[in-house]
């Protein structure tokens, strides 16, 4: 885990906008990012606090409200500055005292949205610098101080600030220059720490207002700051990147209703356009207009800026989704700071989410047709992907990739032969234009729930048995299953799994035949089933989905192929999975049982 501390300051009026900042951070966090939020509370009501705490549903995190005593800021309250700069802006000046147990924190104003994991920013080398930030867009201030920073995003090295007594220096400067300060906290920070602030890349604070007023013309900004009085939540505002604000707003309890969307999406855009023309009727004569136009629309057609976002599409079944993990793990190996998104069919999103290397799982409801394509693209929360990997040629997924403006869409033009897992992994070879070695799939489910603990046997081991599937051709004949189950149950307790009416009837027939087993049919989700398998001695399965899930959890597995067809394509590679055993249709129950017993109780731990 990589802990990242983030701080915001607001009163109740800005609680909603702080919620959007937090939502954007959580949506774009890497899977291993452990986020801790400190909200400097300038009077947030309980209802608003509950809504902010509800954001933990996006991604587990810690949210702490730090009560602020405004009496500590009486000297700062006397500053005469812009009306839209409130006293809460000065809370950051006392962060070393307000957060005594923290060494470092990233501070954001509430008029930000974040399009990237903050891991890289939080872990920059600060040396002895007390602060790090991005240069401001104010040219007049930059002439006076070439390293004048915008205070909307600052990395506070609180240890260095304490060593250098920076907090007291802020206060001393304020008291001495109270009548001269015009830009509030930003002016205080830059005057006191002139030459002592580490400058970071513009992408971490792209100061955006109108079309021609931006600090960076990159098409893929990591952190967007809506500077000036024109905020995205003001109707008719012409903030250039405001669509991002409304995208992340929909992840919060303040999300727009269906009735509100036409007002804010359609009427708001028209009012924004007309307002901008009224504000700058001769905008087309400004060189910066053409600079922005070129960098935003034309340049990306020829020079692809790297977003660090990769998308893997597999909208097939459980087993096929799992067999993409070799591709996912290799993407993370070659691009360790990338954001990896896995897109599946709705029932199998959890099959993607807990795979090693996957940061976020999204799903497509295939029944909704073109409407689903539109909704998916509109709600996709990330920057345009560097590459979309289509594990199968699929018109829907290809269209989505194009509408997402992916720099590359990788798929096979012709049908490929060989093992399914290797085919998926080799898509990365097409992208890199060099060979890529395959690797075992890994699935890391959460811990065993208390309900499952009560269901499972108390002994030192049990065997998971999956004797049937959705496809009747794969099912074990009932007499065969009874014989095998009775043999296994003499040595180990047996846990049977399945899903649906057909499975329930099959298990009922086994029970009526006198078989002794624990029935978990319809009692587990995919992650819960994985936990059951992870704690088993072995899995015996006729269904490739549960079989792949088993050995992805590092559990020895016996796969019984009973259907005709390309079984070798779906069988695991013995060099990657030495403790898997594949049998064809004519295998006897005695052979399966002997193989199971030959594993020994220690083989699983040896495999780990």
Image: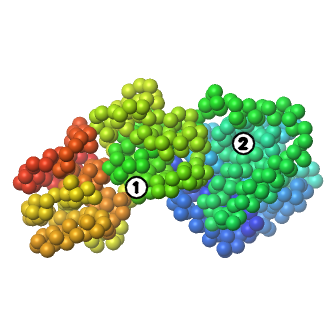
Residue for badge 1: 348
Numbered mark located on residue 206 in the image: 2
What is the crowding at mark 1: few (fewer than 14 residues within 10 Å), some, or many (at least 20)? many
Q: In this image, 597 relative to 57: left or right?
A: left
Q: Is residue 141 visible?
A: yes
Residue 235, how many percent across, how many down? Answer: 80, 58
433 vs 49: above or below: above
Q: In this image, 82 relative to 151: left or right?
A: right
Residue 561, how many percent across, how many down? Answer: 19, 48
- Residue drawn at x 77%, y 56% is 268
What is the crowding at mark 2: few (fewer than 14 residues within 10 Å), some, or many (at least 20)? many
The quarter of the picture where residue 79 lies is bottom right
The quarter of the picture where residue 500 lies is bottom left
Q: In this image, 291 relative to 500: left or right?
A: right
Toward the right, the furthest residue is: 179
Quick one: label 2 or label 1, which is nearer the N terminus?
A: 2
- Residue drawn at x 71%, y 43% is 205
Comparing 359 with 347, the one in front is 347
């Amino acid at each position: 885990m990589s802990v990242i501390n983030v701080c915001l300051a607001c009163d109740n009026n800005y609680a909603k906008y702080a919620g959007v900042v937090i939502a954007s951070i959580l949506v774009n966090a890497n899977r291993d990012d452990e986020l801790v939020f400190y909200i400097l509370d300038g009077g947030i009501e309980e209802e608003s606090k509950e809504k902010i705490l509800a954001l933990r549903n996006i991604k587990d995190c810690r949210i702490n409200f730090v009560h602020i005593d405004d009496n500590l800021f009486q000297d700062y309250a006397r500053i005469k500055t812009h009306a839209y700069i409130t006293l809460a802006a000065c809370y950051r000046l006392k962060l070393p005292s307000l957060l005594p147990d923290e060494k470092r924190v990233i501070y954001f104003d509430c008029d930000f949205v974040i399009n990237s994991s903050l891991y890289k920013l939080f872990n920059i080398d600060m040396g002895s610098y007390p602060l790090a930030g991005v240069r401001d867009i104010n040219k007049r201030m930059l002439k006076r101080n070439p390293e004048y920073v915008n205070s909307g995003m600052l990395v506070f090295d609180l240890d260095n600030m304490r060593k250098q007594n920076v907090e007291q220096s802020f206060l001393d400067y304020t008291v001495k220059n109270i009548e001269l300060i015009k830009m509030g906290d930003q002016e205080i920070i830059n005057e006191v720490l002139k030459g002592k602030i580490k400058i970071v890349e513009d992408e971490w604070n792209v100061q955006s207002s109108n079309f021609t007023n931006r600090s960076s013309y990159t098409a893929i900004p990591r952190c967007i700051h809506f500077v000036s009085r024109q905020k995205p939540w003001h109707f008719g505002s012409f903030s250039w990147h405001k669509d991002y604000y409304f995208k992340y707003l929909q992840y919060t309890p303040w999300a727009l209703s269906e009735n509100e969307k036409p007002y804010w999406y359609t009427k708001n855009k028209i009012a924004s356009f007309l307002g901008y023309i009224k504000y700058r009727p001769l905008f087309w004569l400004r060189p910066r207009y053409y600079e922005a136009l070129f960098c935003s629309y034309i340049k990306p057609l020829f020079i692809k800026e790297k977003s660090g976002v990769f998308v893997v599409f597999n909208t097939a079944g459980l087993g096929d989704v799992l067999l993409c993990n070799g591709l996912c793990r290799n993407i993370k190996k070659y691009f360790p700071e990338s954001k990896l998104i896995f897109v599946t069919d709705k029932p199998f999103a959890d099959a993607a989410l807990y795979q090693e290397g996957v940061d976020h799982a999204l799903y497509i409801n295939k029944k909704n047709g073109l409407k689903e394509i539109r909704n998916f693209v509109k709600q996709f929360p990330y920057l345009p992907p560097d590459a979309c990997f289509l594990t199968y040629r699929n018109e829907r997924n290809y269209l989505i990739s194009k509408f997402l403006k992916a720099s590359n869409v990788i798929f096979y033009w012709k049908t490929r032969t060989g093992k399914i897992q290797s085919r998926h992994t080799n898509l990365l070879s097409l992208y890199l234009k060099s060979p890529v070695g395959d690797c075992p799939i890994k699935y890391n489910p959460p811990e065993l729930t208390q309900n499952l603990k009560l269901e499972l046997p108390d002994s030192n081991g049990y065997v998971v048995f999956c004797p049937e599937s959705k496809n009747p051709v794969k099912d074990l004949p009932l007499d065969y299953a009874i014989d095998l189950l009775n043999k296994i149950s003499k040595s180990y307790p047996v846990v049977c799994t399945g899903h649906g009416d057909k499975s329930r009837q099959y298990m009922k027939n086994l029970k009526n035949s006198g078989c002794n087993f624990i029935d978990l049919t319809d009692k587990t989700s995919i992650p819960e089933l994985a936990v059951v398998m992870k704690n088993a001695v072995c899995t015996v399965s006729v269904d490739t989905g549960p079989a792949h899930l088993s050995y992805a959890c590092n559990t020895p597995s016996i796969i019984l192929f009973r259907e005709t067809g390309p079984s070798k394509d779906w069988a695991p590679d013995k060099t990657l999975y030495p403790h898997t055993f594949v049998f064809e249709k004519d295998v006897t129950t005695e052979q399966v049982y002997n193989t199971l017993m030959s594993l020994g109780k220690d083989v699983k731990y040896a495999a780990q």
